[in-house]
Amino acid sequence: MTLTRRKMIILLGGGAVLAAGAGFGCAATRSPRSAYLPWDRAGSYDDPRMRALSWALLAPNPHNRQPWLADLSEPDVITLYVDRDRLLPHTDPFNRQITIGLGCFLELLRMAAAEDGFRAETALFPQGSAATGLDARPVARITLTADPAIARDPLFAQAPDRRSNKEPFDLTRPVAPAMLDPLAAAVRNGARFGGTVDETEVRHWRDLTREALRIEVETPPYLSGKRRSLPHWPSRGGCQPRWH
């Protein structure tokens, strides 16, 4: 059986959370509707952890690596590990991007669990962490507890509408200063938020991000290896590398 990584999350100890049948081909993942199949299928599981994972497996992550492994051996608990075979050693040597992707996974899992009537209590790096990068220790331990009174996250309704904008931004339409307030209000779990619409500062950050992208795409292994030696290179048309 051949499945794309986008359509499954590997469970430690055996098994996987599947999003679609094995015959669902790579070409079909190019349509927005088919990309939502994991979410459409989430309600088919009896285990609330599997339902939450069905949403989390499509969380935003760098280069579509889906670098997550889940252990469900402990009742009502998800222990999350990073799949170290799916790191980005050449362009993300300290695992910064991968860690951000794991954070997106945990946030979407939390929102999906709340929508399902479960509280997700998360302990980050329960066995500690290394300053030099991710290792074999768990990234997070998530306990799901039934809580009908838990507040639903209003941002969860926007999850199916998420997309990656590949179009040029209209620089003649600056962001209104008032737009920063609702963004700041959405911050939780001890995260920090900062924003500016000052043109001088915006120009500085725009130049910085452009230079960061240039450095990444001009890293020699990234350019010369492409799909053959760098499995994180995105396939054409948005299809994912095959997972066997």
Image: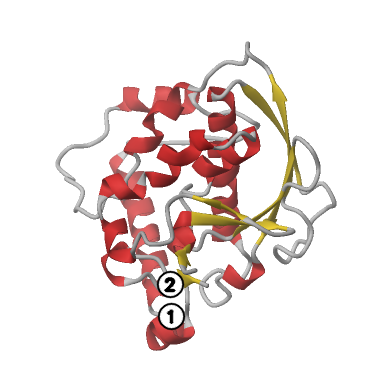
Vertical placement of 50 versus 151: above or below? below
Q: Residue type at mark 1: give it.
A: Tyr
**Around disc 1, counting alpha carbons within 10 Å, would you say few (fewer than 14), some (14 to 19), or many (20 or more)?**
some
Instruction: Please name whichever residue, 52 or 131, is drawn nearer the observer in this view of the structure.
Output: 52
Instruction: Please name whichever residue, 229 or 79, is drawn nearer the observer in this view of the structure.
Output: 79
Q: Residue type at mark 2: give it.
A: Glu
Q: Residue furthest top?
A: 149
Residue occupied by mark 1: 222
Percent across and percent down for residue 162 are 35, 41
Q: Give the number of the mark in front: 2 or 1.
A: 1
Is disc 1 placed on a helix, strand or loop? Answer: helix
**Around disc 2, counting alpha carbons within 10 Å, would you say few (fewer than 14), some (14 to 19), or many (20 or more)?**
some
In this image, 71 relative to 48: left or right? right
In this image, 231 relative to 82: left or right? left
The tag on residue 85 is: none
**Residue at point 44%, 45% (across, down):** 38
In whole angstroms, how far apart are the C-alphas of marks 2 and 1?
A: 8 Å
Residue occupied by mark 2: 216
Using the rendered view, name the quadrant where residue 136 is placed: bottom right
Percent across and percent down for residue 14 are 69, 59
Is disc 2 placed on a helix, strand or loop? Answer: helix
**Residue at point 36%, 59% (across, down):** 24
Instruction: Please name whichever residue, 75 or 118, is drawn nearer the observer in this view of the structure.
Output: 75
Q: Residue furthest right?
A: 127
